[in-house]
Every structure is written in structure tokens, then in C-alpha cells.
Amino acid sequence: MTVSLSYFQAIVMGLLQGVTELFPVSSLGHGVLVPALFGWHNLVSSQTATESFFLTFLVGLHVGTAIGLIAYYRATWARLIGAGLTQLRRVRTEGAATLWRINDDKVSGDYRLLALLVLGTIPVGLVGLALEKPLRELFAKPLAAAIFLIINALVLLIGEKFRRQQGRHATHLAEATMPLPMALRIGSSQILALFAGISRSGVAIVTGVSSGLSYEGAANFSFLLATPVILLAGLYKLPSLFGAAGNGVRLQTLVGAIVAAFAAYVSVAFLSRWFKTKTLRPFAIYCLVIGLVCVVRFA
């Protein structure tokens, strides 16, 4: 297959990745649909290839997105990592079991949140390693992505229903009190995002809201939770960029990653304010409309 990825395509896809990874509209689904809608057959045909330059390019975009998230939450991650190092010092005197005593009165809220983020990342990490490739090969097609985008709209509307039912009784993210099962549920929900068209942030926010969190709390936790998932997934496959699959696309990948980092930073800044007062409904309507249009287009 001839490698052909223009800088214009790299910029568009970088912008798309950085925005749709955080907005609850599915970056993977848009990564399938947009090239097909634009007639970028070089990208469409590459998505299910054994040695795919486009998938290698997407790896770089994921790393860029994670960098944008880390930049936005840099103060939070500095506190969390500092709390982790403090807890490690306790291990010297109290034993390794101290790492998992997250309900201990001596444990800070920052360390407890760090532990919940680590534990919440494990389910999607393990399943992703096992199923990401076969699921992409099976479902990374425009019609399938459009159908899952409609399903994503329904998931978001369910989240809105939970919010209305809870009303003023919804709680805010409490770093020191969130139960471990809740964090695991939210983390495990991200597994659904392995299907192109289902949003990682969307299902995580809906799961958080249905568990009793406010939109703001669920969104903040989902964005923090997404950071290690996106970064580790990108770094795990990054070596492919320096192999045969990366030939001809390395500079384009760098450009796309920079755009994705900037777009992710702006997106999370916008959404962090959005979910203080607004809801998932506009994103649900968007996914429903675009999904239906694309089903008609690709059926």
C-alpha cells in the first residue's frame, strides 16, 4: 500500500482527535467516519490493514492528546504524584500493604484519588490489550461506526435521565470518599469505547452520574481517568511509528500530535466549565443526527 498522508489531513485529524476524545462524541467513531465522508480513501483502506500507517499515525495523536490533558491538569497530577511518593515512604516502615490501604485515616485524599485512578485504569487496559485489534478490524467501518454513534446518543440520554431524577441530590466528586466499586465501574465502562462510535468520556460520565456524582464531578474524574489510558495506549504502540509502518508519516504525525495536544487542552478547559451548569443533551442530539445521516449515507 502506498503511504499517502498530507499535512492537511494530519492537521484535520489531529484537531478532530483532540476535540472528540474529550467531547462525549467518540474520537474513534469520528476517526472512521470523517475520512470516509471526505473521500480520503487512502485513510479508509488503511484502517484494517495488517501494517497500517494510519493506525500508527493515530498512536501519535493519542500521545499528543494525553500531553494536552496532562498540561491542563498539571497541578492536580503534581499533587497526586506527590501524594504517591509520600505513601511510598510509608511503605518503608509499614510494609507494602500500605499502598492499598486507601481507607486508612492516615491516607490523604490525593493519594486515595490516585489509587482509584490506577485501579480504574486496569480493567480497560487489560481488555484493550486483548480485544482492541480484533474489534477495530471487525467494527472500524463507516456503517458500524454510525450505528454505534446512535447507540452512544442513547447512552448520553440515559445519563441525562439519571441527572433529572437525582436533581439537587447529586453529589460532587469527593476524592476522599468515592467508594472503590464506583471507581471500578466508571473505569470498566470505558471498555465500551473500544467500539468505534462509543465515547470513552461519555460512558464514563454517564456511569459516574448514575452512581450519584454530579456532571462536573463525573466529568473531572473521567478526564483524569482517561489520561493514563490514552497515554499508556499510545506509548505501548509508539515503537511502531519508528518501524516500517511509520515510513512516510513521521513528520505528519508530529504535526498532528501537536494539534491534538492543543485541541485537547482547549477542549477539556471548555468542558470543565460546561459541565458545571450544562448537560449531555446537546452531545446526544449531535450523535443521533450525525449517526442517522451516516447510516443513510453508508447503508
Image (cartoon, rainbow, N blue to C red):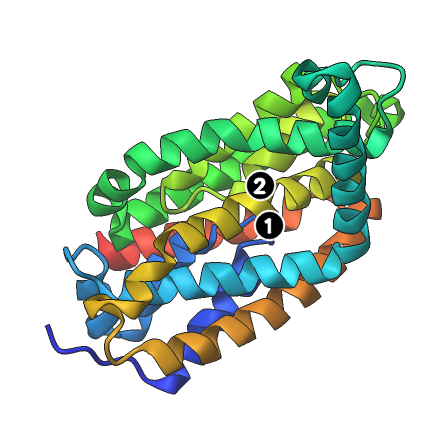
Single out the residue that lies furthest toward the bottom. 7
- The answer to whether residue 298 is visible is yes
The amino acid sitting under disc 2 is: Gly
Instruction: Between residue 143 and residue 20, name the one nearer to us.
Output: 20
- Residue at point 20%, 73% (across, down): 42
Where residue 33 sits, quadrant-wise, is bottom left
The residue identified by callout 1 is 283
| SS label for mark 1 | helix
Marker disc for residue 202: 2
- Residue at point 68%, 28% (across, down): 115
In the rendered image, residue 100, in percent from the top left (x then y), is placed at 68, 18
Name the quarter where the N terminus is drawn.
bottom left
The amino acid sitting under disc 1 is: Phe
| SS label for mark 2 | helix
Q: Closer to the observer: label 1 or label 2? A: 2
Instruction: Give the vertical position of 73 relative to 91 (above or below).
Output: below
- Residue at point 41%, 58% (across, down): 30
Going from N to C along the chain, the mark reached first, 1 or 2, is: 2
In the rendered image, residue 217, in percent from the top left (x then y), is placed at 78, 36
Circle 1/circle 2 CB separation < 8 Å? yes
Decide if residue 178 is on the left or right side of residue 205. Answer: right
Instruction: Give the vertical position of 103 relative to 86 (above or below).
Output: above
